[in-house]
Image: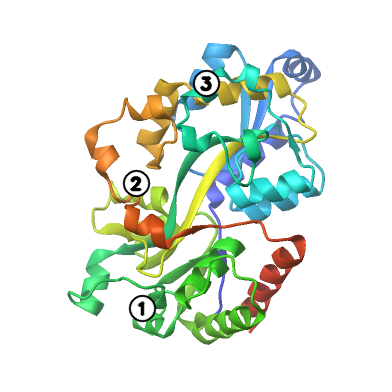
Amino acid sequence: MPLTTTARASRRSFLKHSLTVAAVVPLASRMAWAAERKLNIYNFDTYIGPTTLESFSKATGITTRYDLYADNAELFARLREGNPGYDVICPTNDTVERMILADLLVPLDHSKIPNLANLEPRFMDAAYDKGRKYSATYFWGTLGIGYRSDAVKAVLGEAPLDSWQYVYGADSAKFAGKIAWASDVSALIGCGLKMLGHSLNSTDEAALKQLEETLIANKKNVRTIAGDNGQELLLAGEVDLAIDFNGDIKQVSTEEPKITYVVPKEGGQLWEDSWCIAKGAANIAEAHEFINYILTPEVHADIAKEVGYALPNAKAKALMDAAYLADPIIFPSDEVVKVSEYAKYLSEEMSQKYTDIITRVRAA
């Protein structure tokens, strides 16, 4: 079965259309927009509260525009070509480091973000951004396998879905045509390397060759490479297994309890997403206001209730109920953390090598 790339067309198309409309409104309206305080936000889908932007605008008088990207590769490519007008972005940890080295981010003025003090101490510094010069942590979590428990039980009986082999390896044949891989190249390769017993950040040529051959051999069992909608495919019953982020699966599990999540025994990917200001941003003061607003405990807690990810904000966590804090989908166990790894930015050469591997896998 040929692989296709699926993206969230509805909201993405609408939001891009809304930006196009702004160019053809009457001159007076355009002049009024220019005089307004405004902020252009670029983020993953389903990654903000339903009223967050409206509440921010009411609190600050800042008008927001919001656009979506499917994965970090799309974000990086868009900004590297030249910032088309975005102020605030939300990259993942290894992409933050990549963007710092590519001079695509503006340093944060911590004096304008007093709510940074609400973050837990372990999120106040990071190997990928020493001293949080460029990034303010938004959420953190894991990448694993979302799955339909009824479909898995029908195939495996009482045996657990506990390995990446079921989405990458020979065991993927048991779910042929009902698997979604993630489009994020780093995640796709990294978790595949974990399955083969290597580090998620391995640069070993033999390991990468082994993975490429494994992906090519088993891609016939994969229905699609999902942009940012693996959870929706699970919800619709189009797939039974999807490589996805824990919060995405948590969101749809509230609609369909048969959908659940596991980090395989080989370990998965740990990640942190952070708010950053894009190089070339026109509304830097407003960007700082937005980041500070998001880190307000009540605001951050309300978003967490919607998106289902783990809060790094100590004061916001204090506002959450016991069920959220004890949920193993949201907060991974110590055992899961121990066998999992954060993706690292390796080099532009390795980023291209990863891209080339997936290109060959698609073409094979």
Which circle's residue, 3 or 1, is located before the other in the chain? 3
Residue labelled with disc 1? 175
Question: Which amino acid does the dot numbered 1 rest on?
Answer: Phe
Q: Which residue is mark 2?
A: 331
Task: Give the CA separation, mark 2 to mark 1.
Answer: 28 Å
**Circle 3 residue:** 115
Quadrant for residue 184, please give it: bottom right
Q: Check disc 2 and give the amino acid type.
A: Phe
Element at label 3: helix
Residue at x-position 65% and y-position 45%: 96
Please tell me how crowded label 3 is: few (under 14), some (14-19), or many (20+) other residues with Cα within 10 Å. Answer: some
Residue drawn at x 72%, y 46% is 99
Q: What count of labels does the image hold?
A: 3
Horizontal and vertical percent position of residue 257: 23, 53
Q: Three-letter amino acid code at disc 3?
A: Asn
Observer-nearest residue: 29 or 120?
A: 120
